[in-house]
């Protein structure tokens, strides 16, 4: 229930969908493989938790703390993660399709091959994040998004409107994969390598 203290606990492979865990302390907990789909974890502390292959689909993660989580192949589709912190999180191959990620913070996060298709971004931070081969197909960049020093090797930004993006450089764009419909900030131009070939 709300405010439960499961810090350092092992809660692997459980069926906990629809749980109300607002304000819960799940720091350092092992939630690997657990189904938490459709749950409410508003303001919960999951710092340094293990959420490998955990399902949080369509959960409310507003203002939750996912700093330094280990979350390889985790499911976050359709989550509400406004104000949520994922600083230095390990989230390779995780799925954030259709997620509301306005004001979320992914600074220094490992997001290689993560999927952000149809997600919504506004005042979202990806500074120093690894976004290599991440996908942003049909994502909505409704406001400023910070890409300062982010690694964009083969990041799929075809069709993305990045006109309000902050911190983007020509060198980053040259590594990424866009196309003729990608909109870039003033002063940046599409490289001759676009569009990238499909893998």
Image (cartoon, helix red, strand yellow):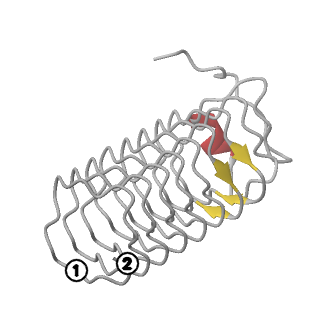
Real-space CA distance between mark 2 and mark 1, rounded to the nearest whole angstrom: 9 Å
Considering every residue shown, the one lying at the far right of the view is 186
Residue 145 in picture, x, y percent from top left: 69, 58
Residue in the image at 68% along x and 50% along y: 169
Based on the displayed image, in which of its 4 quarters is residue 176 positioned? top right
State the quadrant of the N terminus: bottom left
Residue 132 in picture, x, y percent from top left: 46, 41
Please give the label number shown on residue 7. Answer: 1
6 on left or right of 155:
left
Residue in the image at 73% along x and 30% along y: 159
Based on the displayed image, in which of its 4 quarters is residue 4 positioned? bottom left
Residue in the image at 64% along x and 67% along y: 103
Q: Residues within 10 Å of mark 1 (few under 14, many from 20)?
A: some
Q: Is residue 33 above or below residue 106?
A: above
Residue in the image at 62% along x and 32% along y: 137
Considering every residue shown, the one lying at the far left of the view is 10
Q: Earlier in the sequence, mark 2 or mark 1?
A: 1
Q: Residues within 10 Å of mark 2 (few under 14, many from 20)?
A: many
Please give the label number shown on residue 45. Answer: 2
State the quadrant of the C terminus: top left
Circle 1 SS class: loop
Please give the label number shown on residue 59. Answer: none
Q: Is residue 188 or residue 66 the one in the foreground?
A: 66
Residue 185 in picture, x, y percent from top left: 81, 47
The reply to whether dot 2 and dot 1 touch (C-beta < 8 Å) is yes
Residue 48 in picture, x, y percent from top left: 28, 71
Q: Is residue 53 above or below residue 137?
A: below
């Amino acid at each position: 229930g709300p405010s439960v203290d499961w810090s350092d606990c092992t809660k692997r492979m459980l069926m906990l969908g629809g749980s109300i865990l607002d304000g819960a302390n799940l720091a350092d907990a092992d939630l690997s493989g657990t189904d938490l789909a459709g749950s409410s974890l508003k303001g919960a502390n999951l710092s340094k938790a293990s959420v490998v292959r955990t399902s949080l689909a369509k959960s409310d993660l507003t203002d939750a703390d996912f700093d330094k989580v280990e979350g390889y192949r985790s499911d976050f589709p359709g989550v509400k993660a406004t104000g949520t912190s994922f600083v230095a999180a390990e989230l390779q191959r995780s799925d954030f399709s259709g997620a509301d990620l306005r004001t979320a913070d992914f600074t220094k996060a490992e997001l290689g091959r993560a999927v952000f298709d149809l997600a919504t971004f506004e005042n979202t931070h990806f500074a120093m994040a690894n976004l290599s081969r991440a996908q942003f197909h049909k994502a909505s960049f409704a406001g400023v998004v910070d890409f300062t020093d982010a690694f964009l090797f083969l990041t799929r930004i075809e069709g993305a409107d990045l006109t309000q993006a902050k911190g983007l450089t020509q060198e980053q764009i040259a590594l990424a994969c866009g196309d003729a419909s990608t909109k870039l900030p003033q002063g940046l131009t599409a490289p001759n390598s676009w569009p990238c070939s499909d893998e």
